[in-house]
Image (cartoon, helix red, strand yellow):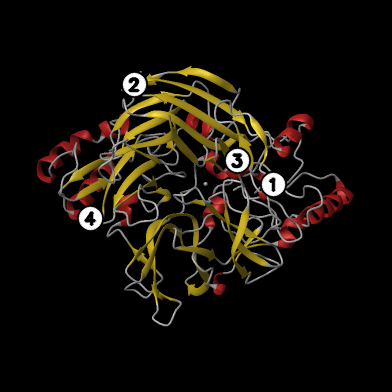
Amino acid sequence: MFLVCLFVFIGYSSCCSSRSSDSIQSHNIMSSVSRTCGGYPHTLTNRKHYYNHTTNAVVVGCSQRTLRHVEKRVYRARSNAHHAPSWPSEKARQTAFGTTPVEQKNEQAVVKNGQVPSWLNGCFYRNGPGTFENGTEKGMLHLFDGYGMVVKIDIQGKENTASISNSFVKSNAYKEFKRNNKMEWREFGTPKPVDGLGERLGDVVRTILGSVGVGQGTTDNASVHVIPRGDGLWAMTETVDGTFWIDRDTLETKGTVEFQDDIDGTLTTAHPLVLDNGTLINLLSIPGMGFILFSCDETNTRKKIAYIPHKRPMSPSWIHDFPGNSEYVVIPEMPFYFNLASLMFGTKGTHLFLDWIPEDKTRLHVIEMATGAVHTVQADPFFVFHWANTYTSGNQLHLDATVYDTPDIVEHLLLDTIRNGSTELPKSYLRRLTLEKMAGGGFSLVPAKDGSSWHTLSDDETRDFGNFADFPTVSTKGTRHRYVWMSAAVRPTNVTNALVKFDTETSSSLYWHESGSLPGEPCFVPTPDSTGEDDGVILSMLTEASGESCLLILNARDMKEHCRISCNIPIPSGFHGSFISH
């Protein structure tokens, strides 16, 4: 699912609780508590909402002391259970980290557990791995390595019906695997199997040549994202070669995107910023040189906005996503670098083929979109997969992200780790980084009260998202927001297993969680005549505890379920998607 360049890199493609049996198990205890704490809320109120991670319930008006007492009682009641219900079930893990058996074409899907909102009419597209097979007995090694497959769910809310299609992206990487039953290029965490030194050296030479435009040196496995572009779709990964045109109706792969310019660069991101006028903003990372921020119009002509030299030219920083809006874009040069020796010879960096060097700290390159001027600010070392939003307030620039203290999550996502269900999910948090524009030009970091770079948004990060947050989304991209929807955790668990709506003004949360299941990235879809920031639905691909794959549709306001749409066949856990209204 990603890259592989050798000259200095390689790619990576790469990222209200149900009343299920375990919540019923705790219901007698919680019933007595509800008389004191205000019971189970069914609608939002102005009172503080507490999510109890042990009882899987949202409680209104309780003190933290009371909640801790309840948690201890329920924990003791559960201590004799064979396993914690919050862990994903074995059947769910088999589906989420397995293989899709067939491709479907407009097959009728079953709507269950309710009805589709009548106003919801359109297609939800999601990209992610369709198989982790690679011709070896063990298969792929990492969640980011599976061959890309786009899923399309055509929703007809007026008729309460839906249909589903799924098709592999016909990249060269996928076609070579299907033709020869073996990998032709390295994926993110899975090196290409080679037979002896001669084959390894030949692969090294091919990668070097590919990095200078001679042949294909890195994987083009487009498995990370799918976005609307023109009258089609782009399936994307983190190499330029891995950007493909996809037919919106048939999901047929139409070919690679051909850019109409002479800008060089092999590494990119699968998270472009798309402005209101349709202009696409993205970056290139050129090993041995630096970053290029560019704009791309509807004719696929790119124009350079700014250039920033790499801190370590022969070991560039890996960037999966970047923050920005129409005024400013920030390139976050985190101290997490490609390790050339690891990519060439299969040796291990601190994290797979990457090196974490926190003493370098993080360089934030703030780029003025109007002029291309670059201002660099130093911050604490951190790792971010995904940025939630970027907005200005007065002379301040605010960057919200789901942040990790270290990149340990990268190794945690090895398939052996997440399939066996024994290692706890690393911690991450929704936080804010604030930069202030100085009178003489440039920016400075506004530190938090404790002197660190990141400002906390929650006054209890265990309560509000289980000390795990990722895949954030807002409904007011580029402008000030109040709500953030994201993946979260009900612990103990080794994967994300909940969805949460977090209120940045009141520091409170509403959860959706179902025992044994694995929900995916939340996608916000506003109502046609939306009047509020949370007026809409959340779409999320869900692997149920039974192993069945569904599209979950939640009310974005109260996180209660509207319905589910069955996918008919097992669909592995994936990454990013888009909704296009009819």
**Please, what is the three-letter code of the amino acid marked with disc 3?**
Ser
Q: CA distance from mark 3 to mark 4?
A: 37 Å
Residue 506 - label: 4
The residue under the point 53% across, 30% down is: 151
State which mark lies toward you, 2 or 3: 2
- Lower position in the chain sequence, tag 3 or tag 4: 3
Residue under label 2, please give it.
158
- In this picture, is 565 found above or below 484? above
State which mark lies toward you, 3 or 1: 1
Residue 15 on image: x %, y %: 52, 46
Residue under label 3, please give it.
223
**Is there any visible trace of residue 226 in the rendered image?**
yes
Q: CA distance from mark 4 to mark 1?
A: 45 Å
Q: Nearer the viewer, residue 15 or 305?
A: 305
Q: Mark 3 near mark 1, Cβ–Cβ under 8 Å? A: no
State which mark lies toward you, 2 or 4: 2
Badge 3 element = loop
Q: Mark 3 near mark 4, Cβ–Cβ under 8 Å? A: no
**Please, what is the three-letter code of the amino acid marked with disc 2?**
Lys
Q: CA distance from mark 2 to mark 4?
A: 36 Å
- Lower position in the chain sequence, tag 4 or tag 1: 1
Residue 265 on image: x %, y %: 69, 57
Residue under label 1, please give it.
241
- Is residue 343 found left or right of 466 in the rendered image? right
- In this picture, is 103 found above or below 461? above
**Please, what is the three-letter code of the amino acid marked with disc 4?**
Thr
- Lower position in the chain sequence, tag 2 or tag 4: 2
- Lower position in the chain sequence, tag 3 or tag 1: 3
Badge 2 element = loop
Badge 1 element = helix
**Please, what is the three-letter code of the amino acid marked with disc 1?**
Asp
